Image (cartoon, rainbow, N blue to C red):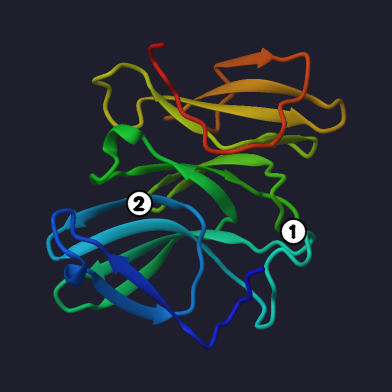
Amino acid sequence: IFAWEPQKSSYFAILPRYGRAQDVIFIEHPATYGMHTVNAYESGDELILDMMEMGDIPHDVVAFANDEQIFPNYLTRWRLNLKTRALHKDTLHPLNMEFPRIDERLIGQKHRHIYAASLFCGKPSYEFDSIMHVDAVTGKGVLHAFGEDQSPHEPIFVPKHPDSKEGEGFLLTYVCHKSTHRSDLVILDAQHVDQDPLAVVELPHAVPFGFHGSWVPHM
């Protein structure tokens, strides 16, 4: 069981790719928590880290003690200066979301487009009702809402072609129909997430809620 101890600090540990244990850089910050990272890349003296940060955590909460106790997660950008050890953070979008993904051809490089399962209506829950696309440059968010009875899973980005520009491709996600206990595989245009699906593959059964899938172009 994990206990939330907000009086203690959090530390970002930055490990050089080609270094020794004594080369690790630690940057201290008031207590924070996040489960899923988006991506990280270097920009001058800074390391840019995008991740989901959990917010509104009560002082005395104990993790997993109450399954009904769920807290919102916000898409957050951390700027860690490797020379001055300074840290700055910004919320990229205020909507509650989780399970973020990018065009994975850009892992470790500067990215612009972020996709995540989101909750547009209701209290914090892992029964998401929408898929969100956030432009990390403009901060603009575009939402595809599935409705009250449908709950999407984590979106997986698939490039249209191997040499397509960033974000030019498709989002794949399972969507559960809660009232009929059945799922669809839904394919969205990653550049126009708010438009109608490009395709819906109707499955005869439900796909249990899960996370962290991968697109494999060749078997």
Residue 123: mark: 1
Q: Which mark is residue 198?
A: none
Question: In which image quadrant can residue 112 be found?
Answer: top left
Considering depth in this image, is 48 or 170 the residue closer to the camera? Answer: 48
Residue that sits furthest to the front in the current view = 21
Residue lying furthest bottom in this view? Answer: 7
Residue 49: percent from the left, percent from the top?
33, 58
On screen, residue 177 versus residue 162, left or right, reads right
Residue at the spot 72% in from the left edge and 15% down from the top edge:
203
Which corner quadrant of the image does residue 55 belong to? bottom right
Q: Mark 1 touching mark 2, by CB under 8 A?
A: no
Mark 2: secondary structure: loop
Say the numbered circle drawn on residue 138.
2
Instruction: Identify which residue, 144 or 31, lies in the foreground.
Output: 31
3D distance between C-alphas at marks 1 and 2: 27 Å
Q: Quadrant of the C terminus?
A: top left
Classify residue 72 by image quadrant: bottom right
Instruction: Write the residue at 34% across / 35% down.
Output: 104
Q: Position of residue 88 (x, y in %)?
A: 32, 73
Front position in the image: 182 or 60: 60
In the image, residue 8 sits, relative to residue 89, either above or below, namely below
Of labels 1 and 2, earlier in sequence is 1
